Image: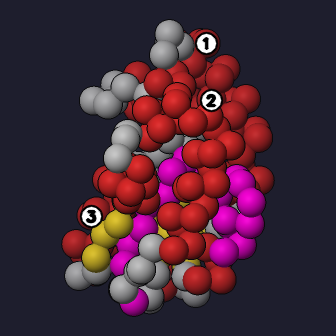
Amino acid sequence: MGLIFLVGFMGCGKTSWGRKLAVGLGYEFIDLDHTLEAKAGATVAEYFASHGEEAFRKLESEILKTTDYSENTVVSTGGGLPCFFDNMDWINSHGQSLYIQLSPKALASRLENAKTPRPVLQGKTGDKLVEFIEYKLAEREGFYLKAKHTISGIDMSVEKLVEVLKLS
């Protein structure tokens, strides 16, 4: 299967499902946010706050395109990464892409209960959080839907992920 890139909105499960899929396939796993943090010497939130979104998106794109991937690797991307520059086209030309799709309400529920707080969501709960996600998802979903495969993030399993990926 080669390189597999997981894309989708924050909270959809790219990292947790990426790890599980990698284990299930005997692949390596790379979380591009962690790769960026190691290179930048700062968390995504810290880098974003001190350098701004434009610099962050440029670095994120550079990390995507210059990381040395082994042939069999599952890669989880940042939620916004597919939506900038030619990143989604690059992903599709270098491997299989899978969009983990969830409704705004399901995403809001996961994000409200997340162990790691997301700075961009600070102060947003309930209906305000759902509205924010609906707005951002409307901007981003066109990019996510360029993925070669789409799977519902509800009731997922490694077996279902593998089945979807083998259709190509």
**Count of numbered badges drawn on the protein:** 3
Residue type at mark 3: give it.
Lys
Residue at position x 65%, y 23% from top? 132
Residue 99 seen from this side: no
Query: On the rendered structure, is 75 left or right of 52?
Result: left
Residue type at mark 1: give it.
Lys
The residue singled out by tag 1 in the image is 128
The coloring applied to the image is: secondary structure
Query: On the rendered structure, is 136 left or right of 40?
Result: right
The answer to which of 128 and 164 lies nearer the viewer is: 128
Label whose residue precedes the other's in the sequence (2 or 1): 1
Residue type at mark 2: give it.
Ile
Determine whether label 3 and label 1 are within 8 Å by CB.
no
x, y percent for residue 94: 58, 83
Quarter in which the N terminus is drawn: bottom left
Q: Secondary structure at mark 3?
A: helix
Q: Which residues are magenta?
A: 71-90
Note whether 127 is above or below 7 in the view shown: above
Q: Which numbered dot is residue 20?
A: 3
CA separation, marks 2 and 1? 9 Å
CA separation, marks 3 and 1? 32 Å
x, y percent for residue 80: 61, 47
Q: Secondary structure at mark 1?
A: helix
The residue singled out by tag 2 in the image is 133
x, y percent for residue 137: 68, 39
